[in-house]
Image: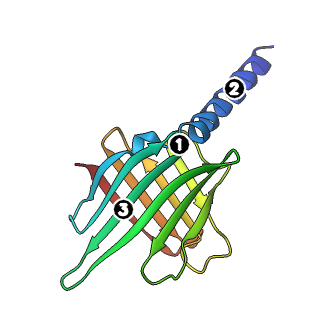
Amino acid sequence: MRNSTLAILFMLMSLSCASVANNGLMNWLVGDWEAQDGAITEHWRAVSADTLEGKGVTTSKDKVSTETLRLVRMEGEIYFIAKVAHNEYPVAFHMTDASTADRVVFANPTHDFPKQIVYQRDGPDRLIVTVSDGGSEGFEIRFSRR
């Protein structure tokens, strides 16, 4: 009896985390974020209950590159859409079932690179973004709220 009660409690907690991730549209992301070295920033704002818009800026010695970012809920699903200068069209990544309230996984297995983007809260004012091929190739950016 005790084992079945624990199993049901665990299952309800798991469903609760997934629900927060899918229905909350990552509102914890809203605001200004800066990488540890200051070379990368992201700014996110809520446009509606179903859309967050963002802008990423990367500054190197002789170049500044920007990307337009968007989180959109469409037909009950959440997508991360990125438009970067070297791609003619925006690229969409679908939120996966592996997402929780504090760690959101987006995937597009048909894209060349990246195939996966993970946003993970590390406390209220820290954020870890992992950009990868879904395996061992990729990089991590650690942000702090500005």
The residues tagged by marks 1 and 3 sit, at their Cα atoms, a distance apart of 17 Å
Q: Identify which residue is drawn at 64% across, 28% down.
A: 13
Q: Secondary structure at mark 1?
A: loop
Q: SS of the residue at dot 2?
A: helix
Q: Secondary structure at mark 3?
A: strand
> Disc 1 marks which residue?
25
Would residue 22 be found to the left or right of residue 88 on screen? right
> From what the image shows, is residue 50 above or below residue 116?
above
Residue 145's disc is: none
Give how far across and how far down residue 82 sits, in percent.
49, 67
Residue 58 percent coordinates (x, y):
29, 72
Is the image coloured rainbow, by chain, by secondary structure, or in one colour? rainbow
Q: Label 2 is placed on what type of residue?
A: Leu
**Which of marks 3 and 1 precedes in the sequence?**
1
Whole-angstrom CA distance, mark 2 to mark 1, is 20 Å
Q: Nearer the viewer, residue 29 or 144?
A: 29
Residue at the spot x=56%, y=52% of the render?
72
In the rendered view, does 35 fall on the left or right side of 48? left
Q: Residues within 10 Å of mark 2 (few under 14, many from 20)?
A: few
- Asked if 23 appears above or below 45 in the picture, the reply is above
* Residue identifier under label 3: 55
Please tell me which residue is depicted at 58% across the width and 58% down the height of the picture: 106
| Residue lying furthest front | 48
Dot 3 alpha-carbon crowd within 10 angstroms: few under 14, some 14 to 19, many 20 or more: some
Total marks shown come to: 3
Classify 55 as above or below 95. below
* Residue 12, numbered label: 2
Q: Quadrant of residue 128?
A: bottom left
